[in-house]
């Protein structure tokens, strides 16, 4: 099952792009990974980030960051509040849990009746 990412914050950076030197193209995005299966949906606490230039369409990797970009990144990274990690059970899981519970109760009732 491939991991999915939700964008939790996108910031427009006023810095010059190290690739094309345009000062309007840089976007810093923070993403949070979440896992979705048939039975549950889970938000992981880890945060990923990416700087991309919309002008030249390049991803700006940390090695290319200038000191200014690094400063702005640190500032936004600190201000970032990740969503709490959480797992949500889907309906099918509840149906299974309900069915198992029902069977257990039926067995217990049957045992009690057998000893009466
Ligand atoms: Zn660029």
Image (cartoon, grey):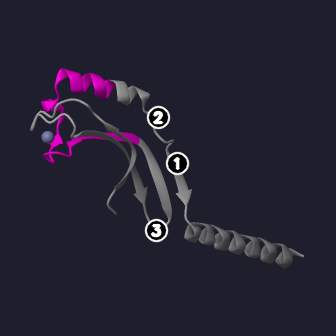
* Residue 5 position within the rendered picture, expressed as x and y whole percent measured from the top left: 36, 52
Q: Please indicate whether residue 92 sits to the left or right of residue 69 in the image.
A: right
Q: Quadrant of the N terminus?
A: bottom left
Cβ of mark 1 under 8 Å from ligand 1: the answer is no
Whether pointer 1 and pointer 3 mark residues with C-beta atoms closer than 8 Å, the reply is no
Return the mark for residue 50: none
Viewer-side label of 1, 2 = 2
Task: Report helix, strand or loop for mark 3.
Answer: loop
Where is residue 65, by image quadrant? top left
Q: Nearer the viewer, residue 101 or 35?
A: 35
* Residue 25 position within the rendered picture, expressed as x and y whole percent measured from the top left: 21, 40
* Residue 48 position within the rendered picture, expressed as x and y whole percent measured from the top left: 32, 41
Viewer-side label of 3, 2 = 2
Which residue corresponds to mark 3?
38
Q: Nearer the viewer, residue 26 or 78?
A: 26
Q: Is residue 30 above or below residue 4?
A: above
Where is residue 75, by image quadrant? top left
Image quarter for ligand 1 equals top left
Residue name at image x 49 percent, y 42 percent: 83
For label 1, the crowd category at 10 Å Cα-Cα, with few meaning under 14, some 14 to 19 and many 20 or more, is few
Which residue corresponds to mark 2?
81
Return the mark for residue 86: 1
User: Which segment did they paint magenta?
Assistant: 46-74
Q: What is the distance, in whole Å, between disc 1 and disc 3 at their CAs? A: 16 Å
Q: How many marks?
A: 3
Residue name at image x 27 percent, y 22 percent: 71
């Amino acid at each position: 099952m491939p991991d999915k990412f939700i964008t939790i914050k996108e910031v427009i950076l006023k810095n010059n792009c190290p690739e094309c030197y345009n000062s309007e193209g840089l976007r810093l995005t923070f993403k949070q990974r979440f896992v979705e299966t048939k039975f549950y949906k889970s938000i992981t606490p880890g945060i990923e980030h990416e700087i991309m230039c919309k002008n030249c369409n390049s991803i700006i990797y940390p090695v290319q960051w200038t000191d200014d970009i690094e400063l702005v990144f640190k500032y936004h990274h600190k201000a970032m509040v990740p969503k709490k990690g959480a797992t949500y059970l889907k309906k099918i899981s509840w149906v299974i849990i309900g069915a198992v519970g029902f069977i257990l109760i039926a067995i217990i009732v049957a045992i009690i009746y057998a000893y009466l």
